[in-house]
Image (cartoon, grey):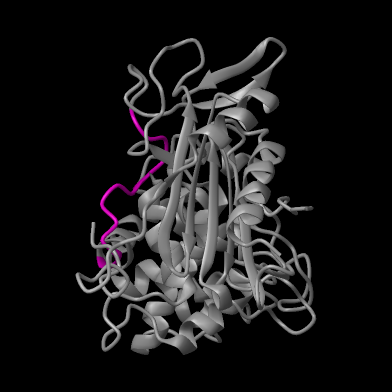
Amino acid sequence: MKFLSSWCSVWFVAALSAQAPAPVVEDLGGLLAKVRTERGVPALGVVVLVDGELRALGVSGVRRQGHPQPVTVDDRWHLGSCTKVMTATLLAKYVERGSLQWTTTVAEALPDLAATLHADARGITVRDLLTHRAGLPGGPPEPLWGQLFHFPGSDAEARTKVAATMLAVAPEAKPGARFLYSNAGYMIAGAIVERVGKAPWAELMQRELFGALGITSAGFGMPGAVDGTTEPWGHQAGKSGPVPVFADNPPSLGPAGTAHMTLRDWAKFAALHLGVVVDREHPLLTTASLAALRTPPAGADYALGWVVTKRPWALGPVLTHSGSNTMWYCVAWLAPEAKFAVLVTCNQGEAAAACDAVAAACVQRFRPQ
C-alpha cells in the first residue's frame, strides 16, 4: 500500500454515552516497536479512530536518544504543518460569525497596512492564503526570517511585519492562479485572525478551538524544557544514529506549524473533521464549514489545510497532511465518509517512511479490503 506523505478531556459524549460501553482501546505499542527498530527512529506514536471512536493507541521508544526515559501516551508531540488545518479551522469560526468571508481580501482584512500593499497583492483573499494560491513564496525573505528568531516585539507584531513586507511587493504569481506552498501565507492568515479576534493567534487557538474541543495538552513550540526529558525531544538523523535537538522555528510561524499536543487530544481535533461532534445542536462548526475546509479550488488537490485525495479503503475523499520542523515528523489520514482516521507521530524529522509504514499497517488492520 503506497502512502504519499510529502505533504507535508471532553471526549465525544454521543460516542461514549453510558448507554453503550466504549470499545476497548487496542495497544499498538508492539507494532510501533517493530517499525521503530526497522527504521532506526527514536520513538513513534499512533492513534486510530474507527467509526469516530478511539479504537487504538500506542507509543514506543525513548524521548531523547541516549537517555532512558520512554515515551508515554501522555507525552506531547510536535505537529509541524498539521497545525495549518487548525489555523484554517479557527478562521472558519470567524467566517461563520460573519467577521470574515473566505473572499475577504488582505486589503480589507489588514486595513492598517492597506496603503502600503502592492496593487497586485491587494486582491489576495483569505481562501488564497489557506489554499496556497496567494502567489507568495514559501517564507519571508532571508533577512527578515533571521530577525524572526529574535524579534524584539510580540509574535503578533512579527506576523504584521511579515505581512507588511511580503504584501508590499508583487506576488510571484497572480492570486488564485497556481499553487505555491507558503508558510508565509499562513502567517499572514494568523495576522488576519488576530485583527478580527482582537487577541494573539495562540490565545485564540486555545480559547476558540482547543478549549471548545476539550483539548488540554496543546501548546506551541517545543514541548518540555531544554534542561530535562519530561517530554520527547526532536531529533535529526546523524551518521551514528538520531541526534537530539531542542529547537523550533520562530514562534511567529505558529499559524503555519508550531502546535504540539498529546495523541488523544490530536484525535479530538481529527474527530471534528470526521464530523463527530459533542453537541449536535451547537456544533463547533457547521457541516457547510467543514465542507468548505475540505474543498480544493477547481482542478486542485489542496483545500484549506488539507490535501484531498482518494484511497480504496476510504468510502469517499481522504484528507491528509504531513508536518515537520526537520526535527519531528507526523502525518494524518482521515476518511470522513468512513469516520476513520489514523494519526502517526515521530520525534525525528526524516521519518516519512517510518510513519507511512505505521499508517499502512493500521489501515490494513482496521480498514481491511
Extreme-left residue of the structure? 18
- The majority secondary structure of the magenta stretch comes to loop
Q: Is residue 348 above or below residue 340?
A: above
Does the magenta-highlighted stretch encompass residue 217? yes
Span shown in magenta: 212-224
Q: Which quadrant would residue 292 be assigned to in this image?
A: bottom right
Q: Is 127 displayed left or right of 356 in the figure? A: left
Q: Is 361 displayed left or right of 152 in the figure? A: right
Position in image of residue 111 (x %, y %): 44, 77
In front of the other: 133 or 285: 285
Q: Which quadrant would residue 266 be assigned to in this image?
A: bottom left
Q: Is residue 82 above or below residue 107?
A: above
Position in image of residue 368 (x %, y %): 66, 61
Q: Does residue 103 show up? A: yes
Q: Does residue 305 show up? A: no
Position in image of residue 75 (x %, y %): 36, 36
Q: Residue at x 44, y 68 (%)?
A: 52
Does the magenta-highlighted stretch encompass residue 297? no
Q: Is 261 displayed left or right of 1 in the figure? A: left
Instruction: Report the number of numbered marks.
Output: 0
In front of the other: 228 or 191: 228
Q: Is residue 268 above or below residue 127?
A: above
Position in image of residue 61 (x %, y %): 49, 25
Q: Check the picture and name the quadrant holding the C terminus.
A: bottom right
Q: Which quadrant would residue 231 be assigned to in this image?
A: top left
Q: Residue at x 29, y 56 (%)?
A: 215
Q: Residue at x 26, y 61 (%)?
A: 214
In front of the other: 260 or 106: 260
